[in-house]
Amino acid sequence: MPVPVLLVTGFLGAGKTTVINALLAAAQGKRLAAVVNDFGAINIDAELLAGSAEGIVALQNGCICCTLQGDLLRTLSLLLRQDPPPEGIVIETSGVSDPAEIVRSLLDPVIWREAALDAVLCVADARALADRPTALEEALLLSQLRSGDFILLNKSDAVTADELAAVRGRLSALLPARTVLETSHGAVPRDLFFNEEPPEVPDRSAPPASRFTTPGFETLSWTADRPLSPARFQLVVSRLAPLLARAKGVLRFEGQERPMLFQMVGERATFGAAPPPPPGAAEVRLVFIAENGRLREDALRAMLNGCLV
Ligand SMILES: Nc1nc2c(ncn2[C@@H]2O[C@H](COP(=O)(O)OP(=O)(O)OP(=O)(O)O)[C@@H](O)[C@H]2O)c(=O)[nH]1
């Protein structure tokens, strides 16, 4: 299985390092490695993170968005060859970099086989956006926000409830399909990141096991014992994507022997080889995670049932 990669982007001072520290602190024994990138001779971000992860690698030669992608790729390769290898890798981009190019590099199939981009998290500074709403018109910030599968509206402690609602409203109007998570001091919902276990839906009669406990989010599970039409499933997934935070599971398409592991984050859906199903498990087992109230269970089930052949 490839090692999941979380790319953390966001404007200067938004709280990226704070987020990564919070993730590392909540790793619960999982071996997470962090790759940080700083402008300037002193790697302040690496120092701030030192001691909290198994492997912290600082890229010292400037901004990874452009000329240094080779450096980033070499660093990933080094991390993956550690013994034991990390179970997750967090990459912090520089606040002045456009992550779109890095995302493109990470989607290269050769890299994907070993280090698969799991999600892009864009950290936004609620205080700064409340003070300067026009920042949302700036190309770099917009590109960072657009690259994010999730937008983490950080520093919510530093704004009033009205200011927070206004910033959230502007973000939702600009990027309606994005999941916006409000937080302070970089606390991220752990369930949404580095939780790459296939969903537990042990058998059809039992209620779906929900280990997902993030407040404000709900899960819906669906199982079936028939293969799916790839074309119809693709259509359903593209309609569901704007409503979902994540979807994952195991499925089998018509005409294929082997089950596939399906993951969707933001608008990016990926397929990989699935482990053999546990005894008694349904052939198709999918779990959908969305903000409360976004999904209509009966409509979702009807759409998915319509994909069965
Ligand atoms: N009040 C408040 N301050 C925060 C919060 N999160 C981070 N900070 C502070 O904001 C400052 C910047 O945080 P960093 O985590 O270094 O931000 P960054 O995005 O990594 O910054 P650069 O690497 O310079 O781009 C630090 O002083 C943090 O302590 C928060 O939720 N609330």
Image (cartoon, grey):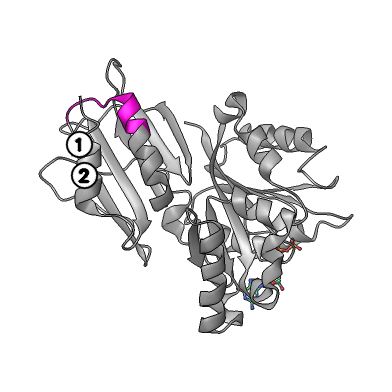
Of 1 and 297, which appears nearest the observer? Answer: 297
Question: Residue 270, percent across and down?
Answer: 45, 33
- Contact, mark 1 vs mark 2 (Cβ under 8 Å): yes
Q: Residue at x 63, y 35 (%)?
A: 106
Query: x, y (%) of residue 305?
Result: 20, 36
- Assess whether residue 36 is covered by the magenta stretch: no
Q: Which residues are magenta?
A: 225-234
The vertical placement of 112 against 131, above or below, is above
Residue labelled 1 has its Cβ within 8 Å of some atom of ligand 1: no
Q: Which mark is residue 305?
A: 1
Residue at figure coordinates x 28%, y 16% from the top left: 257
Kindly indicate the quadrant of the structure image that contains residue 81: top right
Quarter-of-image position of residue 105 = top right
**Image check: 197 left or right of 155?**
left
Q: Residue furthest right?
A: 41
Q: Residue at x 59, y 32 (%)?
A: 107
User: In what quadrant does ligand 1 lie?
Assistant: bottom right
Residue 72's disc number: none
Residue 186 in view, yes or no: no
Image coordinates of residue 84 in percent, x first then y, are 56, 37
Residue 227 counted in the magenta span:
yes
The three-letter amino acid code for the residue at tag 1 is: Asn
Crowding at dot 2, Cα within 10 Å, few <14 / some 14-19 / many 20+, comes out as some
Q: Quarter holding the C terminus?
A: top left
Q: Secondary structure at mark 2?
A: helix
Instruction: Where is residue 45? Give x, y as percent.
Output: 75, 59
Left or right of 74? Residue 150 is left
Of 268 and 40, the residue lying toward us: 268
**Does residue 5 sit above or below 209 in this rendering?**
above
Q: Which residue is mark 2?
A: 301
Give the residue type that dot 2 points to: Arg
Give the left or right position of residue 199, taking residue 1 as reference.
Answer: left
